[in-house]
Image (cartoon, rainbow, N blue to C red):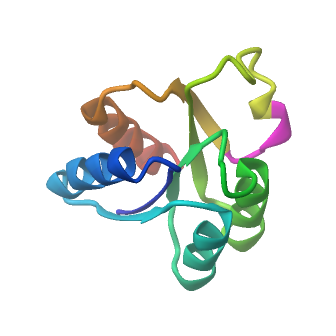
Amino acid sequence: MNVLIVQNDAKLGYIWQRHLQRHDHVADVALDQDSAINHLHEHYYPIIILDVVLEGGSAIAVADYASYRHPDARVIFVTNTSFFSDGSIFQLCANACAFVPIATQPEDLAAMVEHYAKTG
């Protein structure tokens, strides 16, 4: 399974990447909007782990581009803020499948990747 991780914090992104790789996933890390768009232009990712608050761009723009480029791709949003805690992310992004705290354990993210890949 190909997974794109879009996360400002390179250290955290690479921790998630290594954990997903241990579960036999191919995981790429993008640190900003432009890099994420480039990855989505070049590759198909059925699952995207996307930080809601991107310092280098807009998470909504990345989710929209993913929806356009790969309509069946699913997005697991992660955040360290209370922004969108009302669930409105699901109204803004049709490809949103989960919204979890950034502190979610890597093994739990891997389980969500596997779950949403099967249900997608």
Above or below residue 73? Residue 8 is above
Question: What residue is at 64 percent from the left and 60 percent from the top?
Answer: 72
Magenta residues? 91-95
- Coordinates of residue 56 in the picture (x, y in percent): 67, 57
Quadrant (top left/top right/bottom left/bottom right) for the N terminus? bottom left
- Coordinates of residue 105 in the picture (x, y in percent): 30, 27
How many labels, in total? 0
- Coordinates of residue 66 in the picture (x, y in percent): 69, 63
Question: What residue is at 67 percent from the left and 63 percent from the top?
Answer: 33
Residue 110 shown in magenta: no
- Coordinates of residue 109 in the picture (x, y in percent): 36, 36
Residue 93 shown in magenta: yes
Question: What residue is at 19 percent from the left and 51 percent from the top?
Answer: 23
Above or below residue 39? Residue 11 is above
Above or below residue 115? Residue 27 is below
Res 112 → quadrant: top left
In the image as oriented, which residue stretches furthest toward the bottom?
Answer: 42
- Magenta residues, dominant SS class: loop
Res 25 → quadrant: bottom left
Res 106 → quadrant: top left
